[in-house]
Amino acid sequence: MTIKQALSRARETLAANHIEDPSLESELLLRHALGISRVQLYLELEHELSPEQSQQFRRLIKRRLNHEPTAYITGHREFYGLDFLVSPDVLIPRPETELLVEKAIRLAQNQTVSTIAEVGTGSGAIAISLALSLPRVKIYATDISHAALTVAQNNCQKHCVTSRVHLLAGDLLEPLPEPVDLIIANLPYVSESALPQLNIVNFEPALALNGGSDGLEKIRRLCARVSSKLNPGGCLLLEIGQGQSKAVTALCRSLFLLAEVAVSPDLSGIDRVVSLTPASPVADKV
Ligand code: GLN
């Protein structure tokens, strides 16, 4: 069987089993099975697979049919145009989270941002994307999971930002040594009752998804602690889930009088990022 035939068969099998993006997924899995780049794959479409290679590819497709995410099978995921290492210890970075990164970069271009804290960094994808786009900014990235921090550390090394991304173990903002100009977080926001509906939950760490009974427990805890860790004029950027914008903006307004609160939709039109700029001085918290 040639590469071309193997790809087309895999695409059909994945599509028949309702796996999204069957073309991309079969390509990623075949490249992983053969250990080749995208260019090589397309240059060698007529190349015959060895029996071992075919078997290895079939094994990977079987894992995918069992709903194991491709990113965990290959150990990689692209985010913000960069390649990140991932493992089942971390959430797989989502395309919609790129909006959070874009918002942070725009903010840093319009006002002075010297320090950023990313809370719940997981693979480190957000913190590292920011470090690469904002070379003069010092970044702290916290996570309560030591296993996740190991993945983040590997990604910092891969992207040569170990001296600018300071990984800190601990709960939310607790390990932060100083107040910062921007706090950014994609915290777990899936409600406990919705977790079983995510078939990915068998593979992704519940710790990174579970936002408690209404999904907002972690967001609520973070918002309540923000004022002591944000410099005057600083800003908080939060990723939220579908249908959560009303509750989160109301929460922000109740905690921060006269704050500027804004919501931005992602490419699918779902309210995805809440930004909060407390009125200066930060001490206006009630
Ligand atoms: N966006 C993720 C999902 O839909 C959830 C990520 C999170 O909880 N922060 O599965």
Image (tube, helix red, strand yellow):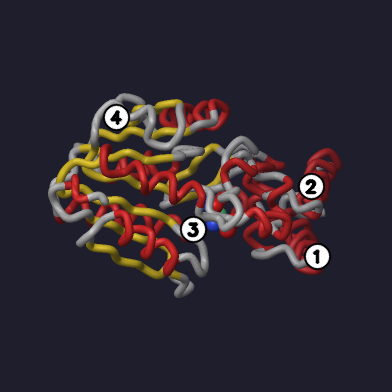
What residue is rendered at 22% in x and 54% in y?
Answer: 278
Q: Identify the residue under disc 1.
A: 17
Q: Identify the residue under disc 2.
A: 63
Q: CA distance from mark 1 to mark 2?
A: 12 Å
Q: CA distance from mark 3 to mark 4?
A: 24 Å
Q: Amino acid at mark 4?
A: Arg
Q: Amino acid at mark 2?
A: Arg
Q: Amino acid at mark 1?
A: Asn
Q: Amino acid at mark 3?
A: Pro
Q: Residue 164: give its label.
A: 4
Q: Identify the residue under disc 3.
A: 95
Image height of 266 relative to 227, above or below: below
Viewer can see residue 42: no
In-front residue for pair 146/102:
146
- Residue 191, picture quadrant: bottom right
Q: CA distance from mark 2 to mark 4?
A: 37 Å
Position of the N terminus, as image quadrant, is bottom right
In-front residue for pair 229/73:
229
Image height of 37 relative to 142, above or below: below
